[in-house]
Amino acid sequence: MPDAIQESNPQTIAVEQRKPGRPRKFAPWFAAVAKRMANGTTLRHALMWEGLHFSNAEIHALYKNLEFRKMYRLERHLYMLNEYGRKPQTEMDRLRKALERRIA
């Protein structure tokens, strides 16, 4: 009888610990590649800039990797918050601002 009561009342059912699944894959270069991709660079080009060479299947798997996607989304969001709407400075503008800082 007590078993029937426990089964009918979901609050009293003991929660069993689940066995952990596969560990999440996280490479040390995820952060560098995600930061390169923040401005809209493709994954393939970001990997080339970092000196990494993958096959098409490995690149596809990397796009599907949850940890990498989280890191990329975070970097993209931060990039958009900091850089959206700003005009890229020309070399002359940079020199002018540096000179103005020295004079002031």
Image (cartoon, grey):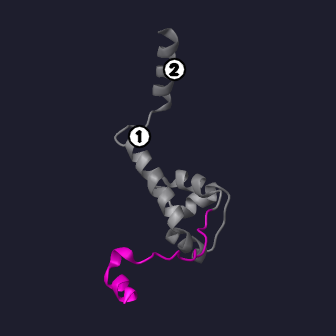
Which residue is at a point 37% across and 82% down the rendered structure image?
A: 6
On screen, 72 above or below 63? above
- In this view, the residue in front, 13 or 30, is 13
Location of mark 2 (residue) = 98
Which residue is at a point 53% across and 55% down the rendered structure image?
A: 34
- Residue 17 lies, in percent from the top left, at 53, 74
> Element at badge 2?
helix
On screen, 88 above or below 93? below
Extreme residue toward the top, this view = 104
Q: Is residue 5 visible?
A: yes
Span highlighted in magenta in the image: 1-26
Location of mark 1 (residue) = 82
On screen, 48 above or below 61? above
Extreme residue toward the left, this view = 8
> CA–CA distance between discs 1 and 2?
21 Å
Q: Earlier in the sequence, mark 1 or mark 2?
A: 1
